[in-house]
Amino acid sequence: MLLSSPFFAAALPTHPGIGETIVFQINGLLVVFLALATIWGVLELTGIYFRRAAARAKATPPPAVVAPAPLPGLPPQVVAAISGAVCVVIDARHRILAIAPVTADLDWAHEGRRQIFASHQVR
Amino acid sequence: MLLSSPFFAAALPTHPGIGETIVFQINGLLVVFLALATIWGVLELTGIYFRRAAARAKATPPPAVVAPAPLPGLPPQVVAAISGAVCVVIDARHRILAIAPVTADLDWAHEGRRQIFASHQVR
Amino acid sequence: MLLSSPFFAAALPTHPGIGETIVFQINGLLVVFLALATIWGVLELTGIYFRRAAARAKATPPPAVVAPAPLPGLPPQVVAAISGAVCVVIDARHRILAIAPVTADLDWAHEGRRQIFASHQVR
Amino acid sequence: MLQGLVDFFSTTGFALVTWKMLVMWAVAVVLLWLAIAKGFEPLLLVPIAFGALVANLPTRGVITTEVKPNGAIDSAIFRIEGRVLPAEHPGAPGEANLQVLKVEKVEGGLYDFISQGIKLELFPPLIFLGVGALTDFGPLIAMPRTLMLGAAAQVGLFITFMGASLLGFSAKQAASIGIIGGADGPTAIFLTNKLAPELLGAVAVAAYSYMSLVPLIQPPIMRLLTTDKERRIRMQSLRKVSKLEKLIFAVVVMIICILLVPDAAALISMLMLGNFIRECGVTERLVKSAQNEIINVLTIFLGTSVGITMRADSFLAAETLKIIVLGVIAFGFSTASGVLVAKLMNVLSPNNPVNPLIGSAGVSAVPMAARVSHVEGQKYDPNNYLLMHAMGPNVAGVIGTAVAAGYFLSTLGH
Amino acid sequence: MLQGLVDFFSTTGFALVTWKMLVMWAVAVVLLWLAIAKGFEPLLLVPIAFGALVANLPTRGVITTEVKPNGAIDSAIFRIEGRVLPAEHPGAPGEANLQVLKVEKVEGGLYDFISQGIKLELFPPLIFLGVGALTDFGPLIAMPRTLMLGAAAQVGLFITFMGASLLGFSAKQAASIGIIGGADGPTAIFLTNKLAPELLGAVAVAAYSYMSLVPLIQPPIMRLLTTDKERRIRMQSLRKVSKLEKLIFAVVVMIICILLVPDAAALISMLMLGNFIRECGVTERLVKSAQNEIINVLTIFLGTSVGITMRADSFLAAETLKIIVLGVIAFGFSTASGVLVAKLMNVLSPNNPVNPLIGSAGVSAVPMAARVSHVEGQKYDPNNYLLMHAMGPNVAGVIGTAVAAGYFLSTLGH
Amino acid sequence: MLQGLVDFFSTTGFALVTWKMLVMWAVAVVLLWLAIAKGFEPLLLVPIAFGALVANLPTRGVITTEVKPNGAIDSAIFRIEGRVLPAEHPGAPGEANLQVLKVEKVEGGLYDFISQGIKLELFPPLIFLGVGALTDFGPLIAMPRTLMLGAAAQVGLFITFMGASLLGFSAKQAASIGIIGGADGPTAIFLTNKLAPELLGAVAVAAYSYMSLVPLIQPPIMRLLTTDKERRIRMQSLRKVSKLEKLIFAVVVMIICILLVPDAAALISMLMLGNFIRECGVTERLVKSAQNEIINVLTIFLGTSVGITMRADSFLAAETLKIIVLGVIAFGFSTASGVLVAKLMNVLSPNNPVNPLIGSAGVSAVPMAARVSHVEGQKYDPNNYLLMHAMGPNVAGVIGTAVAAGYFLSTLGH
Ligand code: NA
Ligand code: NA
Ligand code: NA
């Protein structure tokens, strides 16, 4: 909310003298260093917490990600092509766990439904 | 245009009694049901017309779409690649009627012209 | 800046007579032709300069562009596929000078750096 | 040296931070956690929470608030400085009170101007332009009966109106609290800004949070009111709706609703304009803008402008708790009445039955409430695809709530 | 119970619907049919038709109109409520009539604010920013002579001016009707809003409809005025125009036009800024925005704002029919004068002849009029590619009409 | 006939062109050459140069300027024409000076309205919303010490303040000139518009030109102040910063800065809102809008509005030259103090040394100043990758300059 800022008593006159400008400058610098130093302090604190959390995470190795045993009989170029296509469609970080042949014939219906699901989150 | 709405005589007082709120509520519900019921009525009418039109359309089968006899000597993967490319370029519903080798050398000029034609419809 | 336009003495009355409208029309046309003729004149001048510059450029043939000797043992379809991929990624006019196998393992790091470099020019 | 620093510190904001503001910082952080970790309507709750944080910081040049004689707080106030010029031809008749003001300076904070988007009721209708461009009314047109489920879902609005007025809220405030049950952000903000601007923050937060809670609030009520047999009801697949039908639908709905509730004209006309340009197929450029540029940019400004009204002394009040409680009641009753009216429809016309699970979708929050009905239905019969059927009441609920808002405005607004 | 309902019905709009409004609903539906089924400038006619529908519905909170003493109807009126504060230092010289207004509330309907985009002449120049970013002036720079065809195409404007004033229109109204022949939507709206705002709806509908009718109106006139030999004239292929030339062109045209017709400065400067950022090649981000976000969003608001002025009692008047007739005449004469001046150029400089078919393209409606010349030329010689040559006069016509509007403004506007 | 033409020519602008305006045309062309041929911040300098061209043309309906009694030139003035209505309930207490103005007409040129984006301080914070959405503060969070380099880089601001006040500029003007050293366009425009609007053109042109000159100005100073051994210092690779840390960073920085310098609240809150929606990962739609639509459209309007203030008689003055000279000094000192403080840090904590070359990156112009440090470092050790380390001070400088602007505003602004 708007602070009715108290009239700044020693506000600089329109044309301040040398002495006043030097004082004004140093104060300015002090304020900038003070602000950024406070942020530095807070970041060091959060830094300690997160560095420890990261260390603990490294200690407990993430669940071993078993390499997806490629479907027998699936030539490597086809696997490459499929993962290329997946990469283009899912425009974000992803990991391919398995490649399986299409069984149910409902896939395009699911795709339609998925589009309606994601159709809009803005309300 | 702005309706100078007649002063609503029995407008609710700021703190209406129980009786008044109940009456106010029921009126509100009636208005909502009335509005949506009117729309329902109109939709039933248009629905009848369009269902009949759809039935008539189903009766007269659409002109048989002859499958495009693929160019002799064109391996199926090439046909698949071409239709894939067409699908990417024409980002809308389309049907491939024929695939023919390029004859005239004017194609890129035509493409340039097509871009100018479609360059902008906003005036 | 806003011109305090001098009161236009002979401004047309709200319902001008035939004579006045004809004069008004002809003046209007004269102004339009005058404006566009001035532009025409200037364009003819700049045109002369640029036509000469283009002629001079044609006289001195651009440095012969040596066709990039494709890497021995690289099948033509692979070259086609690579140039196709390059064309999709670099969405602007470009020319492929050479295709060389990846040596240093820093390439993805460079790509990361390139993205930061180009991250934003708006300040 | 020192005197300068001391003076500078008199301009800093430390002295102005009250414990209430610290509580509001916590409220903002909780809302951010809900939005990011729990996925509670992030597109709205993140800007709202951020606005709330700024509202409770000693800012200068962002928002101007004033306490009016009757204790109400008015915000987004700006000043126009100019010279009053004599009217060009003062003598002329009808020129009596004509005044020409040459504006030389306009002064105000960043959100004194951006919030005008809410105060002048511009953001909600323009966001409805985008919502209309994103909504497919096909399922509703294919099964017009579901309009009654959309209407039924408004019952919660009116019941909560009574609850709120019993709890001591004025009629205008009760209407702003009831509208939460409509699960339509823009409509709730449109109505609350007109009838009870002081409740804007609480109503918006409650509305958007409950929309995200639909997958938790609705299923128990749906199960409570339906028998196992009813949950397995399979419905005929919907007929394909032609483009012409959808265009006629947009125009017809607009005319009927505006004739009946002229006060909802701004919302309804923009909703249907957005839908019309989506369905007519020849205005691709305009649809893309309505679905993206317009709705995204306005959501940032709408969210932050709502958040900026959440000042500690007005938000941290008993009313807010009452609103949160009443909000749940509104959602609950809306869900229940949707399901009950669906069961009633089966009684009235047993030949082509309606699966009551889609009744709850009358509580718009498109398309989430429809998804809840679909998922619930699949628990009892995995091959029962209710989604498209539930979309009918789901989009009907958007129209229903707009009509209810129109009713409140025409009765309480003037 | 009953009394409440009766009261409610007194707030509905049914009683306010006049038969004239029903006629306007039909007009709106016809316009929508033209735009969707016949492809008549859909991006403009769909929003305009929708706006017309809303204008003729009993809405509240959308548009405020008032009948002024002299019978003219003024719309898009809003109220500012605030407190007059004493000027900070009243005694100071030059502070005599200084007034500070603390604005507490601004009240108005949705289109009372959106339509300010037209009333303040903001939308047309900003849409020209987008048009400039979409236009390639290369063909014109390669053949500057075609500027004369762009100028010739403005003859229709002035002839129609006379026609309109003969039919009893005031000078200002005659200018607004003549500009229809320029086939430039933004310029027509820019001029009409300044000189004859009461004709805005009719002029805009006529202008955009005739632009779509160019493929019907022009060919007969082109065939009438050209011999078979002339239609087969092949023109030398255009030289390639360098980037620097296009940049110089943009700056030069802006300086010349603003010096000659300062009143067209807003339109010309935005048109050339849009073209400059397109051609300079280093402002890709800005070009993309000008070509898409800015032009699409503003087209929705421009279209609906124009439509909202189409109220039954002002649109359904004899003037509208006269305007529609005069509009065709304007287009006809513009087409004819473009072709005739092309023939004149062949007489004056027979060595490198101009195919008169490209003369008609001086009637901008870019790029459709150029396409018509191209297609017409191919009927007589399938290998005669006139498109690029026709683009010259086509884009020249945009500048020509802006200059004509400047002339009208500086003579009639003040 | 003749009389009409003579009258028309009295409305043209030829007579109003002064030689000073021709000089400004040359200035605009030079700026365009710098932007297009030399790549000097083209996205800003092209619109600014174009605005300057329009400012020095005899336009009508684009910009209204007035010379105030004290000689200062005020621009972007518009008129509101309306009727003063009696307040609804005049007798009520506190209604004494209430006034209701029914606005019938608002009159002004295109840029009288668009420039309000600058006069009302709206464009700079909204562009910072986009800048925040484009900035990754990860490198700064991984090495918080670099905040001191961001602070050090503000020394140039204050030294130039003294230089400017020695050269006779008022305190407010000296602050607006000093801020150029911060190398942040939006912050410079935000401060200059508040303290010394008459210098807006010169300050903006100097700020954006020097940002492009960073690769020329900085390297000599960096080499002058560093020994060969220091230039080869390798720094540990930065740890990976988690999403939660970045979210906490955004909120913490906002709270601390607003508490300390409330006057910078508008800039800081928008910068951090932009960064928050970027990092939280659930508001993809909003981030895309902030990074593209908002920043691109506003850059066109900000640039042209700044250019429009560059009128010959105010720009072609001795002050402009002084500002250009002082601007270089500001950049020079900022670069030097960044490097020196980096060396100081090595003295204070020798165990994990900082390569002083990254000190110069405290002069924001993100990410160019960081790139300069990286490239400079590679000259002495091709495998020394300083870029990520230099991004730390680079983004810290943005916060530093905003805090400095807050200090100037709270001391000189009121
Ligand atoms: Na709803
Ligand atoms: Na034209
Ligand atoms: Na900086």
Image: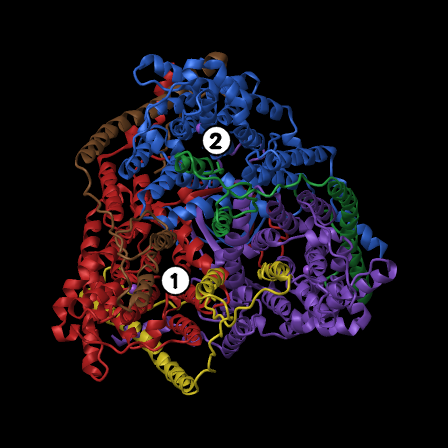
Chain colours: A brown, B yellow, C green, D red, E purple, F blue
User: What chain letter is assigned to the residue under label 2?
Assistant: F
| Quadrant position of residue F364 | top left
Residue bearing the label numbered 2: F368
Q: Residue furthest front?
A: C73
Report the amino acid beneath label 2: Met
Q: Relative to residue F3, is residue F51 depicted above or below? A: above
Q: Relative to residue E127, is residue E2 depicted above or below? A: below
Viewer-proximal residue among B76 and D283: B76
Say if mark 1 contacts mark 2, CB within 8 Å: no
Can residue D131 be spotted in the picture? yes
Viewer-proximal residue among D263 and F398: F398
| Quadrant position of residue D222 | bottom left
Residue bearing the label numbered 1: D134
| Quadrant position of residue D183 | bottom left
Can residue A16 be spotted in the picture? no
Instruction: Determine whether the residue tagged by mark 2 lies in a helix, strand or loop.
Output: helix
